[in-house]
Image (spheres, rainbow, N blue to C red):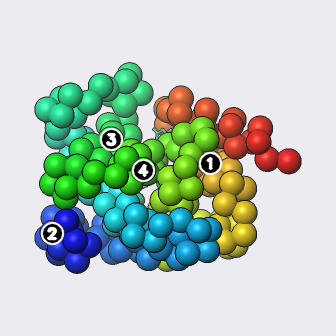
Amino acid sequence: MEVERVKEDLRKRLKEARYLHSTGVEEVAVDLAYIHGCDPEKADMAGLLHDCARNISEQEMIHECIKYHIPISETEEQCPILLHGKLGAEYAKFRYKVTDCDVLNAIIYHTTGRPNMSLLEKIVFTADFIEPFRKPIPGIDEIRWQAYTNLDHCVLMILESTLKYLQAKKSQIDYLTVETYNYYKAILP
Ligand code: DGI
Ligand code: FE
Ligand code: FE
Ligand code: FE
């Protein structure tokens, strides 16, 4: 489906704030694609669609995952919000006719990341965190700077910030969030 038609559909389906966030991620992802040498059209689609399954209730998310045969881990059962990436990729495939695996993986892994992410995966993961409509958090200026300078370092800083936030909230931490953090910590000097 064309980007403009996807946008029109998302504008109807998502709450206004979530739609604005999605277009913010879209724009930042395209900028990062040009800077880091990634396909801007893929970044555009992945950024726009990354949260396309975010606007349903936790209960509905579980139901939808069962419908799409998405396996649910114990952590995901406790924190169903973790499922919106995997479910979003299914919507991208079936509702928006996305076939590109890299785009689908960027949607799947945008919340936890994963070790050894593709350039597009890192771009969407990062754009989700730094887009201009998101509520500012301490350290965001340095993280934004690193997004345009050293993307791996930026990914590590985002994970550090997310882990701190989850620990403060006493939320369950997904094993992939931890593995991703360990991976980027280990590969950086
Ligand atoms: O969907 P967004 O709000 O744009 O952002 P997101 O997909 O990165 O994160 C969604 C929520 O998931 C956010 O409140 C942070 C939280 N989250 C990220 N990693 C983990 C997590 N929650 C749990 N319980 N465990 C994690 O490892
Ligand atoms: Fe999300
Ligand atoms: Fe995120
Ligand atoms: Fe998001």
Question: Is label 2 in a helix, a strand or a loop?
Answer: helix
Question: Is label 1 in a helix, a strand or a loop?
Answer: helix
Marks 1 and 4, how far apart at CA: 21 Å
Disc nearer the start of the sequence (4/2)? 2
Give the residue type at disc 1.
Answer: Leu
For the residues labelled 2 and 1, say whether their Cβ atoms are less than 8 Å apart.
no
- Residue sitting at x 38%, y 22%: 74
Residue 77 seen anywhere in this rendered image of the structure: yes
Marks 2 and 3, how far apart at CA: 20 Å
Is 142 left, or right, of 37 in this rendering?
A: right
Q: Position of residue 39 (x, y in %)?
A: 47, 67
Q: How many numbered circles does the render carry?
A: 4
Disc nearer the start of the sequence (3/1)? 3
Question: Is label 4 in a helix, a strand or a loop?
Answer: helix
Give the residue type at disc 2.
Answer: Asp
- Residue sitting at x 49%, y 37%: 171
- Quadrant for the N terminus, please: bottom left
Marks 4 and 2, how far apart at CA: 22 Å
Question: Is label 3 in a helix, a strand or a loop?
Answer: helix
Disc nearer the start of the sequence (1/4)? 4
Query: Is disc 1 surrounded by few (<14), some (14 to 19) or many (20+) residues within 10 Å?
Result: many
Marks 2 and 1, how far apart at CA: 31 Å
Residue at which label 4 appears: 102
Query: Is disc 3 surrounded by few (<14), some (14 to 19) or many (20+) residues within 10 Å?
Result: many
Single out the mark in the foreground, 3 or 4: 4
Query: Is disc 4 surrounded by few (<14), some (14 to 19) or many (20+) residues within 10 Å?
Result: some
Give the residue type at disc 4.
Answer: Asp
Residue at which label 1 appears: 159
Residue 56 seen anywhere in this rendered image of the structure: no
Residue at which label 3 appears: 86
Is 132 left, or right, of 165 in this rendering?
A: left
